[in-house]
Image: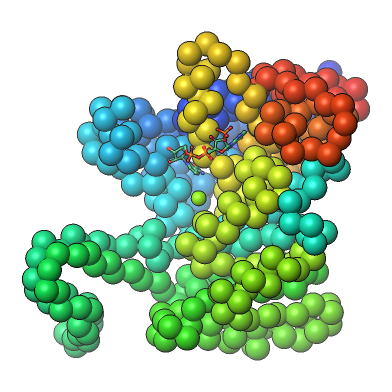
Amino acid sequence: MTKIPMTTPLVEMDGDEMTRVLWQIIKDELILPFVDLKTEYYDLGLKYRDETDDQMTVDSANATLKYGVAVKCATITPNPARVEEYGLKKMWKSPNGTIRAILDGTVFRAPILVKGIEPCVRNWKKPITIARHAYGDVYKNAEIRVPGAGKAEIVFTGEDGQEIRQTVMTFANAGVIQGMHNTDASIRSFAESCFAYALDKKQDLWFATKDTISKTYDRDFKEIFEQVYETSYKARFEEAGITYFYTLIDDAVARVMKSEGGFIWACKNYDGDVFSDMLSSAFGSLAMMTSVLVSPKGVYEYEAAHGTVQKHYYKHLAGQETSTNSVATIYAWTGALRKRGELDGNADLMAFADKLEKATIDTIEGGQMTGDLARITSMEKVTVLNSQDFIKAIRQTLERS
Ligand code: NAP
Ligand code: MG
């Protein structure tokens, strides 16, 4: 069989722990036999990030700006325990945070629906896609541990020397403070990509903040969304028969739980972090969700929404069998290959991505799945496969199709 040729390389960002193990098996079993794969490889494994003083992460993001499409494996975000475990030079920042700060943009996360895996919220009939703003807020904050009594202020100094100053708190005792920012340009591009995506999918767009409490910060988000909608999208939304709906974040959460689904939910960075995990686990499993960063610079980064599945990795290291779900990581590859195909006019590559996704779904619907899905499926007779055999089963389905 001749392999599908590629013209432009994908930026390949390797990662850590169990997902790094899956990464290699997915390539060996599901990609390399079928595609003449071209990638520019960046090893974002924690050891190599540490060796390169995290330059590797910055280089991989810049390569994404150069080539346009990246596929990323889950990576460890160091905490004190990881600094100790890996003997790190320092507690490096979240690679996703670093990459998103360079690319800017919005992360779209949609559940992968499979017959036999019903959402645990009974009234959810259609997928809910989260659009997560990927820039700023708490992910690019400045924090101070306040040692004792004193005054905390925020100060803005303009280039012209103009000063704006506000007291945050007069401390009587120890505490903590935090400074966050966002930019109008980033919020506007977030809004633009959400409206464009909703129009493309012909689904309603919901957006929520806490503008009643955060009368300047969150209100900026609300107003920019309104401006973008009124000036560029209102007419097109009406024509498409879809709506833009703004409400407060707590009201949005209550309504999401009672909804039928079938809409795009635009979330500020932190809300998106939290609610995408809630949605993916309620729709089935953390590993049954796609995730793509769409940058206003016109580039795309595909990833799995879950982490490195540390507990499974330690079992794997101890020589025990694991049953880790590779679907989200497979979909990161298919998403990236399809987008690369689209940009390069490579119809065969796009068709291959579709075929691999279908083989993945067909394998599960045929009763072969990993333990996380077997625990929640309504199917009667299922075969629980280990991490490797699940990927091999998908290959068999793919080769039969
Ligand atoms: P996690 O890797 O998402 O795993 C949490 C739990 O969810 C697992 O223990 C497992 O539950 C279940 N799970 C997640 N993915 C699964 C899969 N593919 N198949 C089966 N079960 C799955 O989160 P974590 O353990 O909190 O974080 C581990 C590391 O990942 C951390 O170092 C964190 O920094 C990093 N992280 C990276 C990213 C990213 O790069 N995108 C995102 C989040 C976290 P059971 O143990 O019950 O089977
Ligand atoms: Mg998260």
Asked whether, in this view, residue 48 is left or right of residue 338, the answer is left
Nearest the camera: 24 or 313? Answer: 313
Q: Quadrant of the C terminus?
A: top right
Asked whether, in this view, residue 215 is left or right of residue 5, the answer is left
Residue 146 is situated, as x and y percent measured from the top left of the image, at 15, 64
**Residue 229, quarter of the rendered image:** bottom right
Residue 320 is situated, as x and y percent measured from the top left of the image, at 56, 13
Query: From this viewpoint, which residue is outermost toward the left?
Result: 149
Query: From this viewpoint, which residue is outermost toward the top?
Result: 319
Residue 169 is situated, as x and y percent measured from the top left of the image, at 20, 78
**Residue 194, quarter of the rendered image:** bottom right
Residue 394 is situated, as x and y percent measured from the top left of the image, at 78, 25
Q: Is residue 297 above or below residue 26?
A: below
Task: Report the number of discs.
Answer: 0
User: Is residue 27 visible in the rendered structure shown here?
Assistant: no
Q: Quadrant of the N terminus?
A: top right
Residue located 83% across and 39% down the image? 378
User: Is residue 306 visible in the rendered structure shown here?
Assistant: yes
Q: Is residue 85 above or below residue 307?
A: above
Residue located 80% across and 84% down the image? 238
Residue located 48% across and 30% down the image? 310
Nearest the camera: 123 or 88? Answer: 123
Q: Is residue 303 above or below residue 224?
A: above
Asked whether, in this view, residue 120 is left or right of residue 269, the answer is right
